[in-house]
Amino acid sequence: MNDLNILIVGAGIAGLTAAGLLKKQGIQYKIIERDTLEKYNKTGYMMGLLPMGVRVLTELNLRESYFQKSVKMSHYEIHKENGDLNKAFDMDFISDDYGPYCGLGRKELIDVLLEPIGKENISFNTTVKQLEQADNKVNVMFSNDEKESFHIVIITDGIHSSTRKLLWTEDEYKYYDTHWGGWVAWLENQSSDTYKEYWGAGSFMGMYPVKNRIGFFIGGPNDEIEKLGLQAFANQMKAEIKPEYKILHDAIDALKNTENPFYWEFSDVRTKEWHKGNVVLLGDAAAAFLPTAGVGASMAMDSAAALVDELSRTDAEHIEYGLKLYTKRQQKRVETNQNDSRQLGKMMFVKSHLISAIRDYSIRYYSVKQLAKNITKTIEG
């Protein structure tokens, strides 16, 4: 049995995946979460999970539970801002060659990942106050002033990680801002197996099915949204949509009537060095993703699997070497996909009507293989 003792900071997708895999390897760990038990995992946005993420769930014996809470996606459609279909892509080539690409809520994925862990084994309302590396261990002071030593600390507390700031200076990680954002809401009691996006000039809409409901997003440039506010911006978008696309009108009305809808600013972050001594970044704390390509959760789970795989062969005297192998194995892979999501964002988020018209025309000549070539490369490793 591996004799490492590991602290995981953050009980999100990356943290829970790492915890489940460490448990399966028989490696001792402790997991802490800043939310209180009462607030933890009460809300969540819609997401897609690529087959590489499902493979990790298979390793954790969570495959069937996952499929019960998700919807297999069959098509991806790009529409014009008036609702007309511009191009439809069949997603069966992913499912046939690699495994299903499914849609689900973040809350539901967290519920699945919690099954082997149990909430009772998470220390809630707890953060890290201080990190000190000495004698091949990390001395940790928690927010309640208790102290404990670990062989390794895995930081997974998100894109704006407070724990990362304890060892990484601000010039060692950089945010990338699209200057776009928008609101998220739900259409309840709705079913679909098709992702639908509506690319406009200075606007964007998306419909993303999960089990028994559809996540709906409308957005645009942050400065325009701030100037107009939700009601005026939503009305402006609604005026462009043809009357026959009733579901879009209903979705916008549902969003306008949602109390305090979540506003999502589209930015990501990249950290130059993923580990310092015996402290390592994982998931969004290392490299966060724009939601444009739908690969963020899958990459976080893939990275967690790579990290635990390396740690399973690492002894207490050679931890930094094991972390170097993990970084060498995963960082370029993650950053390549991060670049792809940024490029896709540049195609989707445009203000100019002329550029939008050229984009809409050219996209008709893309094949599904061309559009998804980078996703295929990701799945194939």
Image: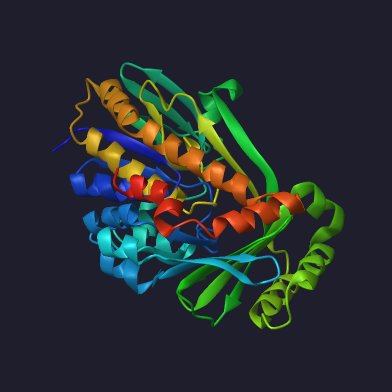
Coordinates of residue 61 in the picture (x, y in percent): 23, 61
Q: Nearer the viewer, residue 36 or 251?
A: 251
Q: Nearer the viewer, residue 111 or 289?
A: 289
Coordinates of residue 67 in the picture (x, y in percent): 33, 70
200 lies left or right of 25: right
Q: Nearer the viewer, residue 153 or 119?
A: 153
In this view, 77 is above or below 347 = below
Point 49% across, 51% down: residue: 293
3 lies left or right of 193: left
Point 41% across, 61% down: residue: 109
Residue 135 appears in the figure = yes
Q: Quadrant of the N terminus?
A: top left
Coordinates of residue 324 in the picture (x, y in percent): 31, 24
Coordinates of residue 202 in the picture (x, y in percent): 74, 54
Q: How is the image coloured?
A: rainbow
Q: Quadrant of the C terminus?
A: top left
In this view, 112 is above or below 350 = below
Point 58% across, 29% down: residue: 174
Q: Nearer the viewer, residue 18 or 242?
A: 242
**Residue 259 sits in which quadrant?**
bottom right
Give the total of numbered labels.
0
Point 48% across, 60% down: residue: 47
In this view, 285 is above or below 123 = above
66 lies left or right of 372: left
In this view, 136 is above or below 313 = above
Which residue is most to the top? 135
Residue 123 appears in the figure = no
